[in-house]
Amino acid sequence: MDLKTAQPLLQLRGVSKRYGSFAAVDAIDLEIRQGEVFALLGPSGCGKSTTLRIIAGLEEPDEGLIRLRDKDIFSSVDNVLVPPQKRNMGMVFQSYAIWPHLNVMETVAYPLDIRRVSAADKAERARAAIRQVGLEGFEDRPSTNLSGGQQQRVALARALVYEPEILLLDEPFSNLDLRVREQMRVELKLLQRRLHIGVILVTHDQVEALTLSDRIAVMNAGRIEQIGTPVELYDSPRTAFVRDFIGAFARIRGVVKSTEGDFVTLGVANAGTVRGRLQANARLAPGDEALLAIRPEQVRLDTSDNALEARIDALLFTGDRYEAVLNCGGQRVETWLPRTVNGKPLREGDVITLDLPQNAATVWAR
Amino acid sequence: MRALAWPRHAGGVFLLFTLVVLVAYPLVLLAYGSFVSDDPSQARALTLSSWRAAFDNPGMASALANTLRRSLLTEIIALPTAVLIAWLVARTDMPGKKLLDTLFWVAFFLPALPVLLGWILLFDPDFGLANQLVAKLFGPGEPLFNIYSFWGIVFAHMASRSIAAKYIFLVPAFRNFDGALEEASIIAGYGTLHTLWRIVVPLLVPAIMVTAIISLVHSLESFEIELILGAPFDFYVFSTRIYRLIEQSPPLFGAATVLALAVLACMLPLMIWQQRILASRNFTTLTSHFKPRVLRLGRVRVPVFALLATGCLVITVVPTVCLVMGTFMNLFGKFDLAIVWTTEHWSHVFADAETLTALRNTIVMGLAAAALGLVWFPSIAYVADRTRMPGRMLLGLLAWLPATLPGIILGLGMLWTFLSTPLLGKLYGSVGVLIIAVLVAALSTGVQLIRSNMVQVGRELEEASWIIGASWMTTFRRILLPLLGPVLLTVALLTFNTAARNVAGVAMLATASNRPLAMLQVDYMVDGRYEPAAIVGVLIVGLTLGMVLVARLLARRLGIRTH
């Protein structure tokens, strides 16, 4: 299904939330489509959780418009505020918010009590939801006797049992250990693909956002820096913040020598010259300070089309490769290096030729 | 290795010994004494005469019934009130929460005895201001208020600690409750009231139960309010009955002891229940770093605040003002005299050796007990929680015991100890006796507070110091004590205030030579000398609230965060 033409499920227009003079959420616009996983990604305090709570109705924004399908659920102009209990959304809290006095079955069935479901139907639907998250056999356990991953499944079942229009996930994996986290990620994606439900995910973990989402909004200081698919964000970050927040970059400082169309030639002190593609919205003239950024997996040692000399100061073995700290004409450069070059192992102290393919390298203003 | 354990734990063994002598031994003596004689200073043969005398004493059964009736009734009114107030303060957008919180703490710290004089000035059937006002408005008749009545006593309890203490217990539970637990229910489609009923209340039941039981135990052992307000209309609870049996001439030690044992037997299930609740630590909801969900009260916001603020002022400022006013009255409560006001009582009191001695006794008691407590309590807490000494469980148990024992019974047990042990007997009549009594009275709270704070100081912090090469003593002094600074300050303050305000624990042990302020006030009031009693009351209030201020200043000076 083509997500680009899908009907918008939820729209936010100019939504702001201020605490005194501090704008936690600053006039943001968002559009979430039916059946997509949409991530709000950013460092802590960037306003992503507040945005999610505004969508849920747990916080009241100061201004803006929020529309669920074709119905306004918040409008500062028309003075509309639909309370959270009437929005029919599902939410998984960061702490899971597992009620310690109810068992798994009671917890999952709880939302059905208000929805005029017959007793038999209620038990059936709760069981189905429990099965869906892989907790069959745990129905009678007190929820607090479960592990973190299991508690999260309970919270997920509780959020899905009444078939909400949107599922909201607030840092859902941050309290799990690494292995459970990876497993839950895969299961959540499979479940979402099966239910075809709209999901809004708040996370500060870029790997989580990249692996789970169809689209991502990167947030910083209450504003949206960039919205795009994971591939778009990874391959062409539009701001320095997005560049530094998503994935790793090897970065080399230099001074602009010349510009030819989309390409810039940089002089790197005591190391030579390199070329790179001019970053989309950068304006550079000869003599300007600039920064060349390249994904570390693009760096090569077996060619020398666009190369700089560097000495290896330290090699950190990570299994399939090294993370390397290089000395490039006096400046420190961090990148990845393969385990061997032309069949020869690398050693600390070696002087190497670092090839930075010019189509993969972007030049930013500093 | 086992053989080496004891010398290594010499300090711990000594602590255990102190607890056995000061807590366990008096109780054993009490039980033994009930079978011996009428006078603990003279050894006699085993006899059942005390038990027989006790059961023949007509006041016994009614004293027990009165105790139960008064406590249960107070609790039934005070607990729901405190729950409601705690919920309002912790989880709604009511204005002025800081002010109310402060006022409840003031109510908690205000000593009951001096405050009583304020109530007497207001609600005495003969001269009470409230009655005079009613008479002026509606014409003379039967006085509307009578503080010397069952309901007067219940009121005095509510107005002193009964509601304030429960509020202070409950507020953290209400406050630390993860708001997401409520939000999850609201997201699922439920309104505020349904969520309150199905989620919030069930989750807080453990905290409310703990509060109910702890305060019931406290309520059962109350003493001074009944002593002052109950005697005039011949209303006795067990504690005032015991006191009466000892104070009368000749004193009936045996009957008092039997009554004390009977009460202990009745309270035993409650004590065990309390210990089990505290041990099971069913406080899963109390550990969260999330902000509580704040409920918007809407239009009732301001009226609710006004109501609560009035209530708070009535239980704090009003009786205090009345108390101070009373000290300047020619004749306490007589507003129709030619000369109503005078400063004469103040000049009398300060020319009077009795008052000055009592003031000195109280200050010496308070400072000495606080200083000794600062060594004794943390050491007990440390040995109980951080060492592997055999018998550390017993140590913890003995340190907890005084909390559940009524002060008057503890005092009686100590009286037995001091009168029948030659070495300790030398102390009898000195301030030293009272210092020990205060230490034991403050023991449980002090140790418990320190233990709960010590849990939060990770063992690694200590181990890091040992690894560096610091000795155990240095580590305790340089690492643990500073980290426990705030709680130690609180404990010192509570100990001092126990010395200043405690009546039940010292009533049995005070003599003319070591009498502290609180006992002096009791004696004045029993004699009907309200004016000097009020002045002594003002001194007690000044000392306790003054110490709170000093502690806060000290905390700020030392950069310690207070709770």
Image (spheres, helix red, strand yellow):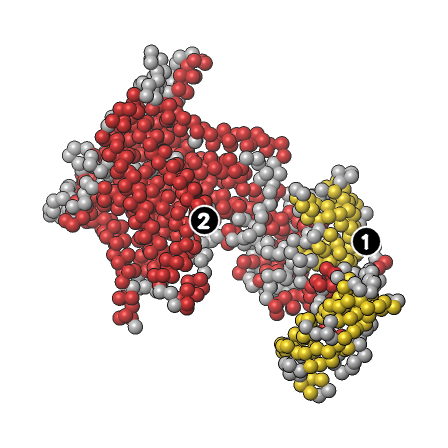
Q: Residue at x 43, y 48 (%)?
A: B558
- Left or right? Give the position of A216 relative to A1: left
Please give the name of the residue rendered at 29% of the width and 39% of the height, measured from the top-left corner.
B363
User: Residue B10's image quarter?
Assistant: bottom left
Q: Secondary structure at mark 2?
A: loop
Label 1 SS: strand
CA distance for labels 2 and 1: 54 Å
User: B285 and A246: which one is in front?
Assistant: A246
Q: Please say whether residue B278 is visible from this viewpoint.
A: no
Q: Nearer the viewer, residue A289 or A252?
A: A289
Left or right placement of residue A2 versus residue A124 in this view: right
Q: Nearer the viewer, residue A268 or A36?
A: A268
Image position, residue B287 (x, y; %)? 51, 53
Q: Amino acid at mark 2?
A: Ile
Residue drawn at x 37%, y 43% is: B493
* Residue position marked by numbered label 2 in the rendering: B560
Relative to A272, residue B152 above or below? above
Q: Please provide percent x and percent y for residue B315.
A: 43, 31
Q: Position of residue B145 (x, y in %)?
A: 39, 22
Q: Residues within 10 Å of mark 2 (few under 14, many from 20)?
A: some
Kind of residue at badge 1: Pro
